[in-house]
Image (cartoon, rainbow, N blue to C red):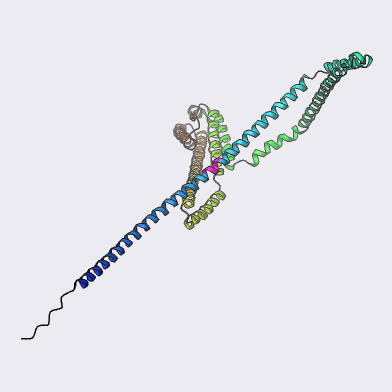
Amino acid sequence: MAPQPPPPPPELPLQKHLRRMLEALAEGQKRHAQWKETWERQHAQEREKWARKQARGVEKWAEHMGSWAEHLEKKQRRKWERRMERERWREQQRAMKRQRQLEEANPLMGWVFAVAALVMAGMAVIRSHELWWLIFVALGMGTAAAGILGRARQLEKARLQERETQGTASREEARDEAPEAPVKTEAPRQAEDPRTARVDVLCDKLLAELRAGPGVLRDVVHQPEQTVEGLRKSCHELARRERELRSLSSPEDERRLEEERAKLAARVESEHDAVVKERLGKALRLLDEQRRQRAELATAASRLEAEHMRLYYTLENLYTQVLRVRSADAASADVAGAGLRRSVEQLGLEMDAVAEALEEVHRDAPPRERVPTR
């Protein structure tokens, strides 16, 4: 049997106390490290919250300063507008007062004041020791007489100049009246739409055929002048409104808007500030809305163009039917008349379609009455 090791010596009270102190110190260091880690984490969270709060505060302050600057600018502009409006009103009042004084100027009253001033001045000179003060009265009346006579003279000159201007204008109008007539008639012809000219020629030919046609034409179309004129106006109205819509959205504007949108989209993508990026995004959405509305205008113009083309070929079909009825003999007159009636009914439907197309483009326009085709 192996010998047992000797037991450890008993721990002295001082050693035991020292060991406990070391254990307590280690435990305190451990708790201090845990507390320090917790404190640093909470401090970091507080700093992050404070930074977000400061960012929101700065953003609100920037928005407030922007709105305040805009309000101040509007306030200054309104102030200057009110001041300019007051100045214009005062100038109008002064002009009206001067005009009223000119119109009320009476030369006879001016000469009366002048004679009275001379009489009072003479009395003041003759009896200077008693009536010397009349010189001041004479001076006031002389000033009033000079003002009245001056305004009367100015009014007379203005009237004479106005009569000369009217006479010159009347002579120029009489001299230029003859050469102006052909210029005024040639200007619309130069800017006339070829489609409008084609419609006018076709309507004139159709009206001539209807007037000189047989009785079956008058049975189908009772009022040829009113019918053809209504068709002519409808075609012209379609062409005019199409030109107006085309002019509102030109290809140059479309290219410009497309280039501006590309530049704005690239700037939105490259912008880092949140407020600037948001406002640029709103501007980009407004630009897209404008392009969409221009596309709708182009679509409406294309619809009107298609409606004009359909109505024109319907007119040509009607003209062909009229020629057929006129050239038909007695046996085939009834057949041609039936075809003409169908063409007239088709034309009535086309007129309804034209009215609907125009009302679709212009909702605010008054409702269009159907042109009588019979």
Up-down: is 147 above or below 55? above
Image quarter for residue 36? bottom left
Residue 270 position, x and y percent, is: 48, 58
State the residue in front, 287 or 321.
287
Name the residue at 48% across, 27% down: 219
Up-down: is 61 above or below 368? below
Residue 86 position, x and y percent, is: 65, 31
- Total marks shown come to 0
Q: Is residue 284 left or right of residue 84?
A: left
One can see residue 291 in this view: no
Direction right: furthest residue: 126
Name the residue at 52% across, 45% down: 65
Direction front: furthest residue: 13
Residue 267 position, x and y percent, is: 50, 56
One can see residue 273 in this view: yes
Q: Which secondary structure type mostly characterizes the magenta part of the structure?
A: helix
Image quarter for residue 71? top right
Residue 124 position, x and y percent, is: 91, 16
- Give the magenta-colored segment's residue range: 67-71
Direction left: furthest residue: 1
State the residue in front, 61 or 309.
61
State the residue in front, 4 or 121.
4
Q: Is residue 13 left or right of residue 182?
A: left
State the residue in front, 48 or 145.
48
Q: Is residue 56 left or right of residue 226?
A: left
Q: Is residue 110 magenta?
A: no
Up-down: is 336 above or below 130? below
The quarter of the picture where the N terminus appears is: bottom left
